[in-house]
Amino acid sequence: MIGLPRSTYYRRLAAPVAEPPIDRDASLREAIETVRRVHPAYGYRRVTHALRRAGVLVNKKRVQRVMRTLLAPPLPRRRSWVIAEPDAITGSWYPNLRAGFLPTGPDQLWVADLTYLRIGADAAFLAVMLDVWSRKVVGYALGPVLDARLPLAALDAALDARRPPPGCVHHSDRGSQYASRRYRERLAEAGLLGSMSRPGNPYDNAHVESFMKTVKHEEIFLRPYRTMAELMTQLPIYLETVYNGTRLHSALGYLPPDEFEQQHHLTTRGGQTAAA
């Protein structure tokens, strides 16, 4: 009556029900979320390398697409707290030995800095020492007071852990803590060569400045510490286990500092870090 062939009618009647599309990115999304639970600030490049180290063969473009469309947006950046450094005593500054110095092995160039951490309504301070060759935190100290004792504690921790040879360059900014008589005497006792940035030039100490940003954006801002005791307990775990032990560094061929040093047959002497 309607001009439709009998075979067409029955073919349409028996047509299979369309199945829901297969989510081909489900397993990849789960793997990415596993990585980001430990390293929530990782971008797609570091996530890709972390997945490959775990045995997941994937292209970085696919990781970027999945992270952009299926995951939460990147973590927002927060404004940094700027702490003005008091002027050091005139004539107590070291020359800048950092310029053009490219270390070829461990304990040739250390960089030091300290920063302010906001803990609830209170203040805390972190002093660190990095080995530029491996990007490893070789010493650090935490405390509620900012004076020369804090960077001295970080320096002593680094000296105990590494026992650097005489001539290792110690570079810092021109803060009064690093220009103090006690600190300069300790450098001389250990055989370290003092070096300081040019006035008002953070680029001379870029490695440790970048480290401070990483600590704040990957740990401090994500884990709102409420007490000094909580900070003293948890931040060392990040510095020693996460930053030194598992965090991938692009400058090291996407290896953690500990693994980079092990691959270059470095035997670490003594302890690794200490808190004041």
Image (tube, grey):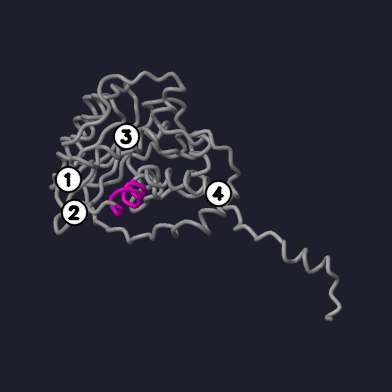
Q: Amino acid at mark 4?
A: Val
Please state which of the two labelled residues, at mark 3 or mark 4, is closer to the viewer. 4
**How far apart are the two marked residues, 4 and 1, measured between alpha carbons?**
35 Å
Q: Earlier in the sequence, mark 3 or mark 2?
A: 2
Graded by Cα atoms within 10 Å as few (under 14), some (14 to 19) or many (20 or more), the crowding at tag 1 reads: few
**How far apart are the two marked residues, 3 and 1, measured between alpha carbons?**
17 Å
Q: Earlier in the sequence, mark 2 or mark 4?
A: 4
In the picture of the structure, the residue carrying the numbered disc 1 is 230
Residue at 39%, 42% in the rendered image: 207
Residue at 35%, 38% in the rendered image: 243
Please state which of the two labelled residues, at mark 3 or mark 2, is closer to the viewer. 3
In the picture of the structure, the residue carrying the numbered disc 2 is 119
Q: Name the main secondary structure of what is drawn in magenta.
A: helix
Q: Earlier in the sequence, mark 3 or mark 4?
A: 4
Q: Picture quarter containing residue 256?
A: top left
SS for tag 1? helix
Position of 213 compared to 116: left or right? right
Marks 1 and 2: in contact by CB < 8 Å?
yes
- Residue 221 part of the magenta-drawn span: yes
x and y percentages locating residue 55 in the rendered image: 53, 33
Graded by Cα atoms within 10 Å as few (under 14), some (14 to 19) or many (20 or more), the crowding at tag 3 reads: few
In the picture of the structure, the residue carrying the numbered disc 3 is 241
User: Is residue 65 depicted above or below 143 in this figure?
Assistant: below
Q: Earlier in the sequence, mark 2 or mark 1?
A: 2
Please state which of the two labelled residues, at mark 2 or mark 1, is closer to the viewer. 1
Question: Which quadrant: the N terminus?
Answer: bottom right
SS for tag 4? helix
In the picture of the structure, the residue carrying the numbered disc 4 is 63
